[in-house]
Image (cartoon, rainbow, N blue to C red):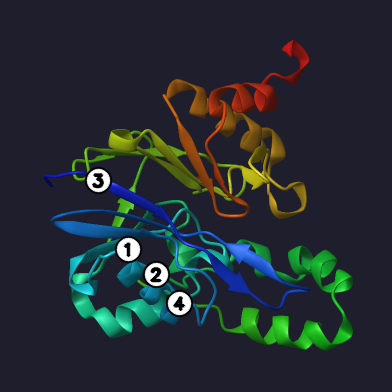
């Protein structure tokens, strides 16, 4: 695709699951098309649509959804998007998370053993709401699977970085033209400061931290974390501190 590339961090305010949280899908676009990265919780599509239009991007331009991984708060509104926009939207995800997204296997973190610590921390009034949500998780067909090193030729090049640990098929995306990393849940951000993955939500912390080290292979000027938003100050130095703290 030709022309300049835009990358917009969306902000979705969500209630429930024990309190208020903000989620940050990303929109990548140029004159010929647009891609949405992650889809928020179920019921988020109206707000996502409004932010897409506010960026000056029409729904007709939206060609694909890339899922960074299988978690509920990333695939939540995908069925609504596909229902409204029909068969022209292609869905991409890593092969290791594909069977969970498609509903062939239950989402890894919604099994009783994985949910128990989270449920115990919730007010009693919230517990049944969470059980109802997770009892019928969103699902959708993945049209094409992705692997480490794959490059979308559009938008000046979007490189897939397989960053397992948070889930087996977690991916991050590097938008070459903008030197922007879309990190998914491989990192989190708090007031512009990068932190490693959240331990209680990560299946394998050692693997997840090894995944973060992969980011040092890229010239990153800005990082968008699904939880916490954007970091655009000293990104490389912050990542180095996460993976090699003993040398700092």
Q: Secondary structure at mark 3?
A: loop
Q: Which residue is mark 3?
A: 5
Location of mark 1 (residue): 55
Instruction: Work out whether residue 106 can be spotted.
Output: no
- Nearest to N terminus: mark 3 or mark 2: 3
Q: Earlier in the sequence, mark 3 or mark 1?
A: 3
Q: Which residue is mark 4?
A: 47
Q: Mark 3 or 1, which is nearer the eye?
A: 1
The answer to whether mark 2 and mark 4 are in CB contact below 8 A is yes
Name the mark nearer the viewer: 1 or 4: 1
Q: Is residue 161 left or right of residue 213?
A: left
* Residue 66 image position (x, y, % from top left): 36, 57
Tell me which numbered mark, 1 or 4, is placed earlier along the sequence. 4
CA–CA distance in space, label 3 to label 4: 22 Å
**Real-space Cα separation, disc 1 to disc 4, in angstroms:** 13 Å
Labels 3 and 2 touching (C-beta < 8 A): no
Q: Which residue is mark 2?
A: 51
Cα gap from disc 2 to disc 1, whole angstroms: 6 Å
Above or below, comparing residue 194 to residue 126 in the picture? above
Q: Is residue 63 left or right of residue 146?
A: left
Q: How many marks?
A: 4
Above or below, comparing residue 203 to residue 103 in the picture: above
* Residue 35, x across and y down, in percent: 29, 58
Disc 3/disc 1 C-alpha distance (Å): 12 Å
């Amino acid at each position: 695709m030709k022309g300049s590339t835009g990358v917009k961090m969306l902000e979705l305010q969500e209630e429930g699951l024990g309190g208020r949280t903000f989620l940050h899908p990303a929109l990548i676009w140029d004159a010929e098309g647009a891609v949405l990265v992650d889809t928020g919780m179920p019921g988020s599509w109206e707000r996502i649509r409004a932010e897409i239009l506010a960026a000056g991007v029409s729904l007709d331009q939206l060609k694909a959804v890339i899922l960074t991984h299988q978690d509920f708060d990333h695939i939540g509104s995908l069925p609504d998007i596909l229902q409204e926009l029909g068969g022209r939207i292609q869905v991409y995800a890593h092969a290791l998370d594909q069977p969970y997204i498609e509903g062939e296997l239950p989402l890894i973190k919604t099994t009783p053993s994985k949910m128990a610590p989270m449920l115990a921390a919730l007010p009693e009034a919230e517990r049944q709401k969470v059980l109802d949500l997770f009892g019928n998780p969103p699902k959708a067909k993945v049209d094409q699977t992705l692997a480490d090193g794959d490059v979308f030729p559009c938008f000046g090049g979007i490189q897939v970085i397989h960053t397992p640990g948070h889930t087996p098929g977690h991916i991050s995306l590097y938008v070459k033209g903008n030197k922007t990393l879309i990190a998914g849940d491989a990192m989190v951000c708090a007031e512009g400061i990068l932190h490693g993955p959240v331990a209680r939500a990560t299946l394998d912390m050692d693997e997840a931290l090894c995944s973060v080290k992969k980011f040092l292979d890229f010239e990153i000027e800005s990082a968008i974390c699904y939880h916490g938003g954007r970091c655009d100050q000293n990104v490389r130095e912050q990542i180095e501190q996460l993976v090699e703290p003993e040398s700092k």
